[in-house]
């Protein structure tokens, strides 16, 4: 590519011929640039090479980031090999599992914005010619996607892979069950400790289809990661080889001048929505795709997203929607096999960083990674690739277990994901709580009954930063007496590990005086997943007509007094004041 004198060698494409690199423009304008680079140990030859920023989330924050230094280093070596000059930058992410159930969870979505801002700052201030993002988990990958769209440079993602499952396919969700079993005296401390020891046995993203695994798969589906990158075993040499190849790929993109916007388009985002449905992915994935589209200046419609979901079968039998841990996804052929299975509903003509289309990349990958490899590993468990990633004519479900509801309680939409319940119309009695803490007290005290809809409001982006309501849903899910007979409704978010009947992202949120703010205990709520409706259909006196329900909401609004808002400081104060709507992905946006 470049020979260290600023001249091109071994040109891969004519696209970038005559193009002046951003890094070289900065040298011409800034007299101190060269001296400062030399002060970092660069050689004089390095100064004229293309500058590639490696933006990594490495840190000691959680298993998904603890190993990313080695991934970044291999990407560094790959970039050196093709003649670029890499520079490592860092901004570690936080773990939702560690913040879960505490006030720090309110900072979770805000952390996505911090990561995006830091990566944007690093790319622009370094005068980068291209950026390689190294990340694994929930807010890191979305933050990097948002930053990539703002930078619009040649872009590659080197993904951090997935941790291995524990004994008996055990994954992190098992520890919550174990804790409750210990409290009930069903298991001893030694057994509980053994389950904890086995919950996260290696580095990598948690081995269920939570937000981390969802976002790795979506990054590859968008065309930004090499085929077979998503959910590669985190402790494997294959992950490191992929990282090195990712560095080499970025060098080629810089050489060709192929930018983020040449790869990620409206078609790419629609493909990602299709994949989100087919994997039974986290509802957070929808929020992050909306944020990416907003950042790109692309239209994003929840109604259109639901049309995509409705026509896409659930093909992956992976927890929490299915039976198996998510580390088996890669062993079964990963995204390339899924793309092959989705040939009738996905647009295989979308471009990827390989220089080939999504469909061609998947085809080529499956040719060099024969089925026999997958069959050999999975056969040890009595499984086949088709056990994990089903063919289109034999899906886990004909339609994905995710949808968008509308109605008099959610004029702006709400997202529903159901793992155990069917999609029939169901009626619930409202139990209304202004925040998760009071709801948790009722759940723990066993004061929730079958038929209750637990409404947790004032947890939206403008109220408290849109924290997840994971503990509420999980405590209900492990209580077999009510698990399938209650629902949770919220203007907050849900964890990717959520089980049960859960309706979140209700918009407008209570803090914006949406209809959810007007609900009262005893109201009758209809959740009709099949018809995509979320409606108030009665009060404590009984059911009523649609017109009567609207009239009731209007009367309540006329006398409505909003509760005193929580006072926030620091990052949360900034985020809640600037957070946009759910349809815009709750992206932090300047006031108009």
Image (tube, helix red, strand yellow):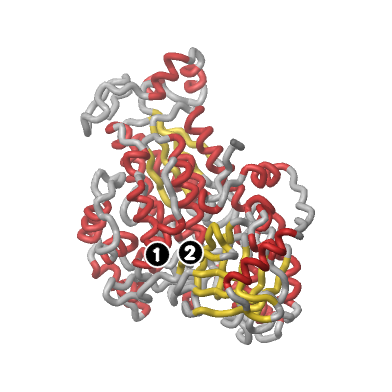
On the picture, is 12 further left or further right than 83? Answer: left
Quarter occupied by the N terminus: top left
Taking the image as shown, residue 524 lies to the left or right of residue 584, namely: right
Q: Secondary structure at mark 2?
A: strand
Question: Image quadrant for the C terminus?
Answer: top right
Judging by the rendered image, the residue that carries numbered circle 2 is 404
Residue lying at 57% horizontally and 82% vertically, measured from the top left: 484
SS assignment at label 1 = helix
> What residue is disc 1 on?
309
Residue 391 appears in which quarter of the rendering?
Answer: bottom left
Instruction: Say above or below: 154 vs 358.
Output: above
**First-in-chain label (1 vs 2):** 1
Identify the residue at the far right of this view. Answer: 564
Instruction: Residue 70: give x, y in percent of width and height.
Output: 46, 47
Compare residues 181 and 317 and report the one nearer the observer.
Answer: 317
State whether residue 297 is above or below residue 448. above
In the rendering, at what x and y percent does residue 440 appear? Answer: 72, 71
Say if residue 355 shows up in the picture.
Answer: yes
Residue for point 51% across, 20% down: 36
Q: Is residue 305 left or right of residue 436?
A: left
Asked whether 574 or 46 is in front, the reply is 574
Q: How many marks?
A: 2
Rendered residue at 44%/50% (across/down): 300
Whole-percent x, y for residue 557 in the image: 70, 60
């Amino acid at each position: 590519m470049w020979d260290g004198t600023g001249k091109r060698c071994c040109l891969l494409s004519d696209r970038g011929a005559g193009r002046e690199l951003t890094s070289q423009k900065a040298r011409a304008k800034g007299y101190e640039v060269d001296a400062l680079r030399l002060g970092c140990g660069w050689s004089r030859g390095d100064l004229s090479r293309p500058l590639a920023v490696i933006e990594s989330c490495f840190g000691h924050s959680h298993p998904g980031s603890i190993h990313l230094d080695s991934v970044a280093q291999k990407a560094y070596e790959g970039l050196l090999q093709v003649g670029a000059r890499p520079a490592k930058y860092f901004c570690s992410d936080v773990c939702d599992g560690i913040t879960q159930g505490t006030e720090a969870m309110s900072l979770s979505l805000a952390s996505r914005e911090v990561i995006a801002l830091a990566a944007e700052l690093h790319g622009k201030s370094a005068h980068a010619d291209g950026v390689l993002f190294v990340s694994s988990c929930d807010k890191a990958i979305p933050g990097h996607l948002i930053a990539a769209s703002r930078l619009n440079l040649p872009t590659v993602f080197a993904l951090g892979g997935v941790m291995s499952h524990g004994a008996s396919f055990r994954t992190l969700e098992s520890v919550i069950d174990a804790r409750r079993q210990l409290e009930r005296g069903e298991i001893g401390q030694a057994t509980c400790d053994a389950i904890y020891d086995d919950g996260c046995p290696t580095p990598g993203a948690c081995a269920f289809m939570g937000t981390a695994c969802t976002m790795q798969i979506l990054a590859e589906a968008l065309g930004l990661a090499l085929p077979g990158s998503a959910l590669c075993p985190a402790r494997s040499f294959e992950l490191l080889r992929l990282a090195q190849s990712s560095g080499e790929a970025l060098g080629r993109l810089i050489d060709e001048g192929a930018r983020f916007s040449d790869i990620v388009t409206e078609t790419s985002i629609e493909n990602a929505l299709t994949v989100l449905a087919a994997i039974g992915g986290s509802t957070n994935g929808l929020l992050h795709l909306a944020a990416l589209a907003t950042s790109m200046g692309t239209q994003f419609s929840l109604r259109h997203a639901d049309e995509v979901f409705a026509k896409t079968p659930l093909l992956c039998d992976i927890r929490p929607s299915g039976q198996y841990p998510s580390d088996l996804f890669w062993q079964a052929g990963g995204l390339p096999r899924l793309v092959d299975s989705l040939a009738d509903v996905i647009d295989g003509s979308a471009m990827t960083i390989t220089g080939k289309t999504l469909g061609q990349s998947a085809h080529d990958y499956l040719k060099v990674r024969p089925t026999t490899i997958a069959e050999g590993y999975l056969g040890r468990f009595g499984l086949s690739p088709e056990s994990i990633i089903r063919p289109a004519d034999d899906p886990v479900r004909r339609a994905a277990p995710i949808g968008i509801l509308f109605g008099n309680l959610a004029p702006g939409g709400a997202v529903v994901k159901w793992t155990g319940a069917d999609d029939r119309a169901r009626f619930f009695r409202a139990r209304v709580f202004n925040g998760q803490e009071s709801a948790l007290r009722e759940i723990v005290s066993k004061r929730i009954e079958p038929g209750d809809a637990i409404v947790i409001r004032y947890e939206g982006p403008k109220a408290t930063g849109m924290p997840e309501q994971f503990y509420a849903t999980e405590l209900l899910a492990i209580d077999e007496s009510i698990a399938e007979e209650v629902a949770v409704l919220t203007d907050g978010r849900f964890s990717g590990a959520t089980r049960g009947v859960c309706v979140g992202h209700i918009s407008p949120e209570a803090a914006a005086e949406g209809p959810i703010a007007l609900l009262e205990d005893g109201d009758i709520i209809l959740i009709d997943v099949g018809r995509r409706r979320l409606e108030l259909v009665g009060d404590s006196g009984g059911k009523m007509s649609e017109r009567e329900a609207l009239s009731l909401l209007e009367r309540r609004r006329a006398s409505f007094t909003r509760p005193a808002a929580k006072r926030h400081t620091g990052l949360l104060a900034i985020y809640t004041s600037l957070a946009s709507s759910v349809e815009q992905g709750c992206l932090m946006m300047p006031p108009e």
